[in-house]
Amino acid sequence: MNFLFDIGHPGDIHFFRFFAEEMKENGHNILFTVRDKEINIRLLQEYGLPYIPYGKAKKSVVAKLLGLIQMSWNLWKIAAKFKPDFYLSHGSMYASYVSTYFGKPHISFEDTGNMEQIMLYKPFTEAICVSDSFSKNFGKKTVVYKGYHELAYLHPNRFSPNTKILEKYDMSPDQNLILIRFISWEASHDINHSGITLDMKRKAVKTFANYGRVLITSEHELPEDLKPYQIKINPIDIFHVIAHCRLVFGEGATIASEAAVLGIPSIYINSTSRDYTQEQEKKYGLVFNYSEEKEEVKKAIAKGVQILDDPTLHGAFAEGRRKLLADKIDVTDFIKDLVSNFYNQEYRASLQIK
């Protein structure tokens, strides 16, 4: 079989990586189609995954809509040669349209609930797979699994932290590593969001620097006074850094959830929270959700101080991770089962796929 993975975000590469590699090992053909974004290309190269870029990522909503025809046409040309049997994506409109033209299934793995995007791809998608933490339902196309996206690549079956990777970057867990994440706020679901203000970013860095070594990863240019904290590492090594941190703080939902499944407390700042980070707070005590309001960010920083001040909380976070892993599954195994049995009517009925 031929599997095409349409990629928009670096997290999508991590999500599909192990499934794609296993399919290749089993004699199937795989291809990643990708928006021409530097981090996406580098990740695919680092993992040695075959890929074809087919256009620049669009920033504004208008540009994204105007680019629908061109991007879909670019993907159509690639698909016409590769002849996929399955199209898999994190809610790709382009993959849904092209798969429909060729009469092949498009399976979407959804975790953001970006409805303006979902409404554009849903009619052309066979199944929309969502975590059991997800609050939205898409009717007969909804497939629910017990997990989070991050458990496709950070489940203990797939990932083991390695302190030797830290040594490559002159880091050590003894330094009390504190990772801060700033995002670009350019995704379609980020409209009307501005994130943490610059003065509050400085306050967070200055405060946390009293407790250990602050590391910043940022999608946009940092001011000169924050640049000394910025880390530049191979993107495939970032999970080893997260796994050895005392705290993860910032604007990225994905990195907050990555920290949670690794048992690292994370503070997530976004006025539109995610169902999965809410569950990770309420059920497992691993994520703490705050809005972008200045007073809320102050509370978030204070929460970070509370966590860093009390090393005895480590046991509670370890127990939260144990409960999480007991409740959830290896999501890569779920993807394998879904694809292997997709045309089995009994299996489809068990998932209520119509």
Image (cartoon, helix red, strand yellow):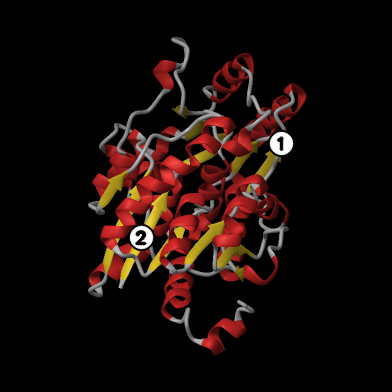
Q: Residue 227: where, in percent of width, then height?
A: 42, 16
- Neighbourhood count class around disc 2 (C-alpha, 10 Å): few under 14, some 14–19, many 20 upward: many
Q: Residue at x 47, y 35 (%)?
A: 176
Residue located beneath label 2 in the image: 4
- Foreground residue among 224 and 55: 55
Answer with the quarter of the image where residue 23 lies. bottom left
Q: CA distance from mark 2 to mark 1?
A: 37 Å
Q: Is residue 263 above or below residue 238?
A: below
Q: Position of residue 224 (x, y in %)?
A: 44, 10
Residue 47 placement (x, y as % from top left)? 26, 51
Q: SS at mark 1?
A: strand
Disc 2 element: strand
Q: Residue at x 45, y 77 (%)?
A: 337
What residue did someone put label 1 on?
A: 290
* Residue farthest toward the bottom in the current orientation of the protein: 346
Give me the residue at 47% from left, 12% from top. 223
